[in-house]
Image (cartoon, grey):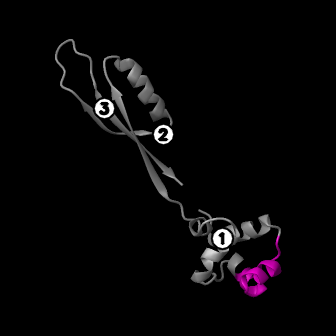
Amino acid sequence: MATFSEIFKALRKDKQLTQEQIAEIFGVSPQAISRWENAVSYPDITQLPNIAAYFETTVDDLLGIKKTVKKQKIIYFQFRWQENANAINEYLEDGWMVKEMHTHPLTDGQHPEGVVLIEKTILN
């Protein structure tokens, strides 16, 4: 995971600004910028929204915070189990996991039918 120092320095360099120029923009000394980029100190917390806005990013991204997002899908299956199994397997190959599976009671000669709930966790 990238740190604030690494992210800030990369953003500054992407804008092709010197430490002196970015210090003037944020109203701090060039030495403060150097300390931020070397993880010796950090900006005042109240400056983070301004820094993020200047670089057109979010405070979370600036701080290297990754969010976990869970996506879920429900797949209904009936009669042609093999076709449904193939569709479910495609999701599983793409990193999805079966969270729940519910089937109806079967009697002789019936084809399975029910619901599969699949889930995928994504770091955002």
Please indicate, yes or no, whether residue 100 appears anywhere in the rendered image. Answer: yes
Which mark sits nearer the N-terminus, 3 or 1? 1
Callout 1, which amino acid? Ala
Q: Quadrant location of residue 100?
A: top left
Does residue 19 lie above or below 110 as drawn? below
Label 3 and label 1: CA atoms lie apart by 45 Å
Instruction: Please tell me whether the stretch drawn in magenta is mainly helix, strand or loop.
Output: helix
Q: Closer to us: mark 3 or mark 1?
A: 1
| Secondary structure beneath label 1 | helix
Residue 116: x and y, percent? 33, 34
Residue 32: x and y, percent? 72, 85
Label 2 and label 1: CA atoms lie apart by 34 Å
> Can you tell which mark lies on residue 95?
2
Q: Does the stretch in magenta take in 124?
A: no
Q: Quadrant location of residue 113?
A: top left
CA neighbours of label 1 inside 10 A, class few (<14), some (14 to 19), many (20+): few
Per the image, the residue denoted by label 1 is 53
Q: Closer to us: mark 2 or mark 1?
A: 1
Label 3 and label 2: CA atoms lie apart by 19 Å
Which contiguous range is marked in magenta?
A: 17-35
CA neighbours of label 3 inside 10 A, class few (<14), some (14 to 19), many (20+): some
Q: Closer to us: mark 3 or mark 2?
A: 3
Q: Which residue is at 70% across, 82% downward?
A: 35
Callout 2, which amino acid? Gly
Q: Nearer the viewer, residue 52 or 95?
A: 52
| Secondary structure beneath label 2 | loop
Q: Which residue is at 67% across, 67% downward?
A: 7
- Whether pointer 2 and pointer 1 mark residues with C-beta atoms closer than 8 Å, the reply is no
> Can you tell which mark lies on residue 115?
3
Please indicate, yes or no, whether residue 38 appears anywhere in the rendered image. Answer: no
